Amino acid sequence: MPDLVPKNTMDLRTSANNSIMDKSSSSPTTNSQYQRDEVLSTQTSIVKNKNHFDQYFPKNDNLLLQDYVIPNRLMKPKAIQQSFKSSFYLPSSNLSTTISTQNAHLVKLGRDTSLNNATNEIRRRWNRYKKMQNDLISLKASQCDIVKKQLLLKQIKIQLPHLNLSDLNVLHMTGNDLEQFYYKELFKLKQTYAAEKIQSIYKMYKDRKKYLNIQKERLEATQKIKNMWKKCRWHRLVRQMVQQRKHEAAMRIKTYLVGFLAKKQVKQELANKKLQESMQYFEKKKLEIQTDAQVKICYYWRRYKKEQEVIRKNILEAQLRGNLSMDKNSKGRRKYTKGDIYQKPGPSWGYSKLRSQKTQNMKS
C-alpha cells in the first residue's frame, strides 16, 4: 500500500530543527550565511517533494476520495465534521498549490540575509508545514471516515437487508456512529436470530417429546393389535391346517387309487390286447389251414376225378378194342388186350390223354 505522506517529511523536520539549534551556537556572520544556505536547501527540498505530493494529489479537483489509498497509521486522528456530500470531493486548494505559493514567497524572502528574518522565515515555514500536515491528516481522516462509511453501508445492505437506509440520517453521522449503529443492529439481529433459534429448538424439543409419547402409545397399541391378530391368525391357521391335512390325505388316497385303477385297467387292456392278438393269430392260422385244405382238397379231388376219367377212358378203350376184336374175331376173332382204354371226349380229354401217355411211358 503506498504511503500518502512524503518520504522526505522527516528530513524537512530534522533540517529545520538543526537550523534552529545552530542559530544560537554560531557567529552572526557565519550564522546568517548558514541560515541562508539552510533556507535555500529547505526550499529545494520542498520543491523536490512537490512532485511526490502531486502524484497522490493531482490538480483535478473533482476526483473522488475513494480513488486514493489511505495508510492505516493515518486513520487515528479525529475526523473533520463535514457534510456527507462535500466530503466526497477534494478541496480546490490542495497541498501542491500551497507548496507552489510558498516557493514563490521563499524565492522573494531568500534575498534577505539577516539572521532574524531567516529564522522567522524558517519558523513560519515550519508552522505552515505543520499546519499543512495537520490539514492533510484531517483530510485523510475524513477520507478514511468516508471509506469506512461506504464499507459499513455495503455491510448493512448485505447483512441487514431489512433496514431502510433512506430512514437513516447517514449524512450527519460519523463513521464511528455508523459503525456503532451497525454493530448495534447486527447485535439485535443476532439476538433475534438466537431467540428464534432457542424458541425453535425448545419447540422442537416439545414436539419431539410429544411425538415420542405418541409413538410410544402407537407402538403399544400396535403390539396389542399384533398379539390379537396373531391369536386369531393362529386359530385360523389351525383350522386351515386340519382342512389341509384332510385334503392332502384325500388327495393322496385319490392319487394312489387312481394309479391303482389305472394300472389295473392297463393290465386288463394289455391282457385283452394280447388275447386278441392271440385269437387273431389262431384265426389267421385257421384261415390259412382252411385255405390250404380247400386247395389241397380241390387239388386231390380234381386229381381223383382225372384219374377216374383216365380209368374210365381206359375201360372204354378196352371195351372198344374188345368190341373191335370181337368183330374181327367174328370175322377174324380179334380179342382185346389189356391196356386198351376207351377215351370219352370231354373237357379233360387232353389232360387225360397226356396223363395216360405219361403213365404208359412210365410203365414201359
Image (cartoon, grey):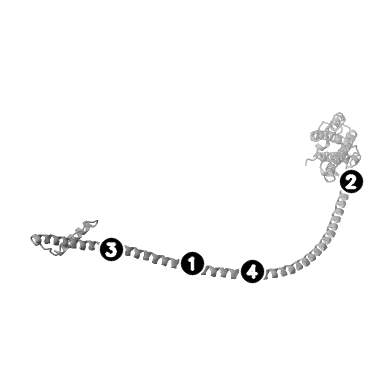
- Give whichever of 166, 79 is nearer the camera: 166
| Alpha carbons under labels 1 and 4: distance apart | 32 Å
The residue wearing badge 1 is: 269
Kind of element beneath mark 1: helix
Rendering coords of residue 2 (x, y %): 78, 40
Q: CA distance from mark 2 to mark 4?
A: 91 Å
Pointer 4: what residue?
Answer: 247
Determine which residue is flagged by label 3: 301
Q: Residues within 10 Å of mark 4 (few under 14, many from 20)?
A: few
Image coordinates for residue 64, horizontal then vertical, percent: 83, 35
Q: So how many labels did they put on this image?
A: 4
Q: Earlier in the sequence, mark 3 or mark 2?
A: 2
Q: Tell me the kind of residue under disc 4.
A: His
| Residue occupied by mark 2 | 181
Rendered residue at 25%/64% (across/down): 304
Report the front residue among 251 and 75: 251
